[in-house]
Amino acid sequence: MSFRGLRTSKFRHVFGTAIRKDAHYEGIRVTRNSWDSTFCAVNPKFLAVVTEAAGGGCFLVLPVEKTGRVPNNPPMVAGHRAAVLDIQWSPWDDNIIASCSEDMTVKVWVIPEKGLEESLTEAEATLEWHQRRVGFIAWHPSAHNILMSAGSDNMVVIWNVGTAEPLSVIECHNDILWSCGWNYDGSRIVTTCKDKTLRVIDPRTGEVISEKKKAHDGAKPQRAVYMKDGRIFTTGFSRMSERQYALWDDNNLSEPITLEEIDTSNGVLFPFYDPDNNLVYLGGKGDSNIRYYEVTDQSPYVHYIDRFDTSDPQRGLGFMPKRGVNALQNEIARFYKLHPNKVEPISFTVPRKSELFQEDLYPDTASQTPALSADDWIEGKVADPILMSIRDELKSVLPQKPRLAGLKKPNALNRPKLLAAKPSTTNSVRDSAPPKPAPAPEPTPAPAPAPVPKVERSPPAHERERSPPREHRGAGDRQTSVAATAQKLQQNAFERQEIQAREEHLYARQRLYEDERARQQLYEEERIARARENTKRRSRYDTPDLYQPRQAQQQQIPPDFDFQELLEEVKGLRALVRQHERRIMNLEDALGIGD
């Protein structure tokens, strides 16, 4: 019997953490629409939430850094004539957002750089084609200004947003669509429909490449997302209303690669896919948890990691792109959870001891530069998204990795050489002979008389040897001196660079420490304020007026009070009590349970 051991993965210890209350967005009336949508979209600059409105559809746009309570009657995007069902930010411009509504239109808006200062009612582009409400929209992952919309008229329309013209209309569905999405390079789309069929379609021609009827047997909505390697991840329900997930090959939908049951619940599961780390997050509408899985090429292919639980159910979720996560804290994902009257950020991190940038957690991610123009995509060209390095974006604030090779520095281990020991005549212990015994001491002879010192005189001047003349310093010595000076200056410059880098790193850590202390101080002030409020509330019930004797309270009885009527009422209550006591005694005697 062989021991397989645990599966090795760098995402085995991913932890979800709810951000503190001072980072919430409070005072937002989140929509109560029953449509199966996330109702939230977020990018590194703005947060958009579909809100409750009367007489039309609108959504709120806030700068991400503007946390706290939203003022009463804030400016909104209010150009739809009916409820807004879905919103999506453009991957190429953080100020452009698209929305679809029950008024059968898709609108594209341009948000000012500093956010909304007044309500926005005029859209930059209005896309009209659908004959019923439009439920879902999705931007092309690599082509500029290409947008897909799906409506309740069973049609999928591919738009050129720049010219507000439809490029293709797909009419192969027999019922209402439940979801639609692009693959990694935008050459295919995947849809789920109320007829329980999973379809893979060519978006330019509308041709169905492959399909699977009854991908999930349940009658409730199904969702599907394309993965980076071409596989499809779906969520749905079984015939017994058990929630499921499945993994499919888009070229062969006859059988799923894997199919697993999760639990029994009514909420539709929304899959959120991270193509950089191949992670899938599942959050259900009405659930109070978020599950996350890692998808690999090894069986069982979809590996459960953990789940993040809260006490309150969620009305929707927003998923931050990888460009907006905090790499300083090893954050790999961030969600924005919708409550009835607020939005709560949730952070998922991978704890590491090192403070350096973690290359394995942050591979290159999709950038804001489109790989194709709309005309290129119409002509049939295909290209993967252009990637960017997160390390390059955060180069100014990330601590620098120590250099392996740089300017030449003097060797700190140089020491004056010791006198060499006398080499041994033997090659090994085996060849060495035993030590010879010391010779016996001989008798010391008598000391001889000291000799007379001989005085040596210096030779005459004509016999003395002349000392060689002193050599003159030439060009070779000057070059050696210049090279030594240059090396010393270069060494000093390297040391100054190291000191500057160390100071910048310490400054960044000090700034993070001060921000954390400020948050702790604010939290402590709120706690003290709540304690004072509770003390005041309890003091209202501790007044001595409530414990005064009854005689003192009798002075407040009005003089025209009718005591006789009160006595008659008391007598009637006593008679009623005695009557009930007699009935109880009779029942006890009849049942034999009396004393």
Image: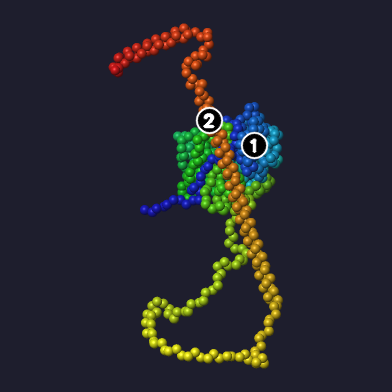
Q: Classify residue 579 as left or right of residue 191.
A: left
Foreground residue among 205 and 265: 265
Decide: few, some or many residues near mark 1? Use Cα within 10 Å; few <14, some 14-19, many ≥20. Answer: many
Q: Is residue 411 visible?
A: yes
Q: Quadrant of the C terminus?
A: top left
Indicate the quadrant where residue 139 lies: top right
Task: Give the image location of residue 580, x and y in percent.
Answer: 37, 13
Q: Residue at x 50, y 48 (%)?
A: 11
Which numbered dot is residue 535? 2
Foreground residue among 312 and 88: 312
Q: Residue at x 52, y 34 (%)?
A: 312
- Kind of residue at disc 1: Val
Task: Give the image location of residue 26, x and y in percent.
Answer: 59, 34
Decide: few, some or many residues near mark 2? Use Cα within 10 Å; few <14, some 14-19, many ≥20. Answer: few
Q: Is residue 318 visible?
A: no
Please tell me whether mark 1 sits on a helix, a strand or a loop: strand
Foreground residue among 198 and 45: 45
Indicate the quadrant where residue 334 lies: top right
- Kind of residue at disc 2: Thr
Indicate the quadrant where residue 62 lies: top right
Please tell me whether mark 2 sits on a helix, a strand or a loop: helix
What's the CA distance linking mark 2 and mark 1?
39 Å
Task: Give the image location of residue 355, x and y in percent.
Answer: 56, 52
According to the picture, the residue beneath numbered tag 1 turns out to be: 61
Q: Which mark sits nearer the N-terminus, 2 or 1?
A: 1
**Figure label count:** 2
Relative to 463, residue 520 above or below: above
Which numbered dot is residue 556? none
